[in-house]
Image (cartoon, rainbow, N blue to C red):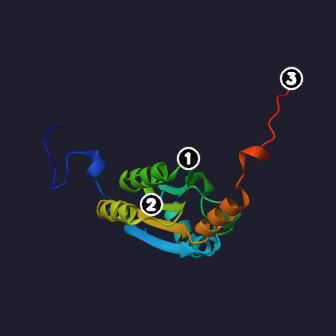
Amino acid sequence: MNTLLGNAPRHPGLWVDMTSTTAPVKQGIETKKSANQGLTELTQLCSHLAILSQQGRWIVLINPPHIGYKQILANANVRMDRVLLVHTKDEVETLWAMEKALTSGTSSAVITWTTPLDARDNRRIQLVAKSALAQGVIIEDVNTHLHDEHMGANTSVTPTSLNLSAFH
């Protein structure tokens, strides 16, 4: 039993099914800018995601907006039991979750919705891309800064206009 037969690696986790006809996973990370919260970009990826979902690995969606992504994926025949949703509290957690999902080996695609990344975060993503085991897509919402500026202009509250009261 301890004799190695052929040139196969000893650990079963390293065995590769050479008879598989599934398409190889494109590795790396692509950044797409979106003006409609990634609706167009997700729709374009759906046929590829449907193929990847049949391979039994996860399709990870990190911070998807409420654009009807479930219906879009279901209409494209993506296996919904292979979709993993991740909701994070901030950009640091978002990038960390993306990094872990890309390098874990359990995902075939990772799609992340985020605000435009700064130079430091872009460099971090470039480093992660070198060891990625899945296809990564970052959808940057180009309208985010407009929403923030608009909200900042309308929500300036002076201390004299605050109306605080207690409910008993």
Using the image as rendered, state which of residue 32 and residue 55 is in the foreground: 32
How far apart are labels 1 and 2 at the CA level? 24 Å
Residue 36: which disc? none
Q: Residue at x 63, y 65 (%)?
A: 149
Q: Residue at x 62, y 73 (%)?
A: 43
Q: Is 164 displayed left or right of 139 in the figure? A: right
Residue at label 2? 108
Q: Position of residue 38 (x, y in %)?
A: 60, 70
Q: Answer few, some or many: residues within 10 Å of disc 3's Cα (few below 14, many 20 plus, some between 14 and 19).
A: few
> SS of the residue at dot 3?
loop
Q: Residue at x 67, y 67 (%)?
A: 72
Q: Is 135 displayed left or right of 76 in the figure? A: left
Q: Residue at x 20, y 53 (%)?
A: 8
Please tell me whether mark 3 or mark 1 is closer to you in this view.
3
> SS of the residue at dot 1?
loop
At label 1, the amino acid type is Lys
Is the C-beta separation of discs 1 and 2 under 8 Å? no
At label 2, the amino acid type is Ser
Q: Is 13 displayed left or right of 56 in the figure? A: left
Q: Earlier in the sequence, mark 2 or mark 3?
A: 2
At label 3, the amino acid type is His
Q: Position of residue 69 (x, y in %)?
A: 66, 63
Please tell me whether mark 2 or mark 3 is closer to you in this view.
3
Residue at label 3? 168
Q: Position of residue 37 (x, y in %)?
A: 63, 68
> SS of the residue at dot 2?
strand
> Visible in this render: residue 102?
yes
Please tell me whether mark 1 or mark 2 is closer to you in this view.
1
Residue 89: which disc? 1
